[in-house]
Amino acid sequence: MKQLKYLVMALAVAIAAVACSDDDDFRDSIISTTPKPLTEVDKWIRSNFGTYNIDVIYKWHDFQTNQEYDLVPPEEITVVPCLSIIQRIWMQPYVELGGDLFFKKTAPKQIMLIGSEGYLENGNTVVGEADQGMRITLYNLNAKNPKDDDVVASYTHIFHHEYIHILHQLVKYPAAYEALSTNNYTQNWQSYSVNAALGLGFIDPYAMENANEDFAQMISKFVTLDADIWQAQFNQAEAQSAEGYRILREKETLILQYMQSVWVIDLYQLRDLVRREINLIQQENAQEP
């Protein structure tokens, strides 16, 4: 037994000596550790979004995308025009009102840009997502012309909507908000017209899906729509139902109070800044050939 023990030990030493020979050269590797040089797009992103510790993902990393959808990356030419709009209609207004510290605290750590739409099993498409306060994903860049007024409006609405999801994930809105429409939330919201939704106290049919979407949709619509158009929604609601109008007004009061008391953001001032940038972008686009 003692001889066997020494034999096993000698064999182990021999294997170790072979495995760790001084003649072995481990300097070469098939995995490159050399950082890839920054492109002009990368430099622009670092200069404009890096200040707020926001990582913009546009190069393809399939494992980071939503695996429920078949997706394609954005064309590189679409990235800076899209981000430039987002910077002007979302980032700058919030920084101007809340300051750098507020924005660094609440901004998503990542923005992911996707070239195609995300298709759901029910046939609907996803235009944007907010993931646990950490990431906002924007879809379908390849199909959108950033010089189109409708696209500017779409980016504005989507990004404000998704950002509100992050804010209410950080600090929940009051329970009184959800209580106003508890009995009318439905997964069948697509079957409702705008007038029917307004008559029930929702700003549009999509807000009927659940309280979170209702809350985000209300604030996003408030800051992105012109004040006259916003008021017209209430006039339309009143024409449909006195109760729907009352609920909508109470929701308006609650979103104003929430943003002011929790985040010290005046939604009227925010709307003025957002609308100013929307109008300027549209004027600039109209002047370009």
Image (tube, grey):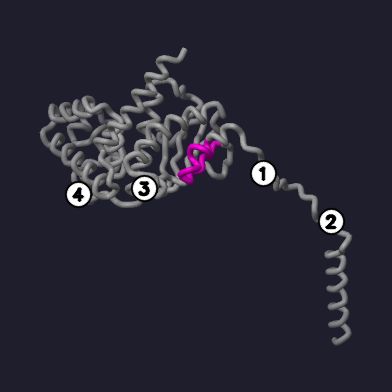
Give how far apart the Cα atoms at labels 1 and 3 are.
32 Å
Q: Secondary structure at mark 3?
A: helix
Marked residue nearer the N-terminal end (2 or 3) = 2
Q: Is residue 201 visible?
A: yes
Span shown in magenta:
45-58
Tell me: 76 left or right of 135: right
Cα distance in 3D space between marks 1 and 2: 23 Å
Decide: is 258 above or below 59: below
Label 4 CA crowd tier, 10 Å (few <14, some 14–19, many 20+): few
Which residue in the structure is indicated by mark 1? 35
* Circle 4 residue: 176
Residue 275 in percent (x, y) is at 31, 28
How far is disc 1 from disc 4 in space, using C-alphas? 51 Å
Q: Amino acid at mark 2?
A: Asp
Instruction: Reply yes or no: does residue 265 show up in magenta.
Output: no
Q: Nearer the viewer, mark 1 or mark 4?
A: 1
Label 1 or label 2, whichever comes before in sequence order: 2
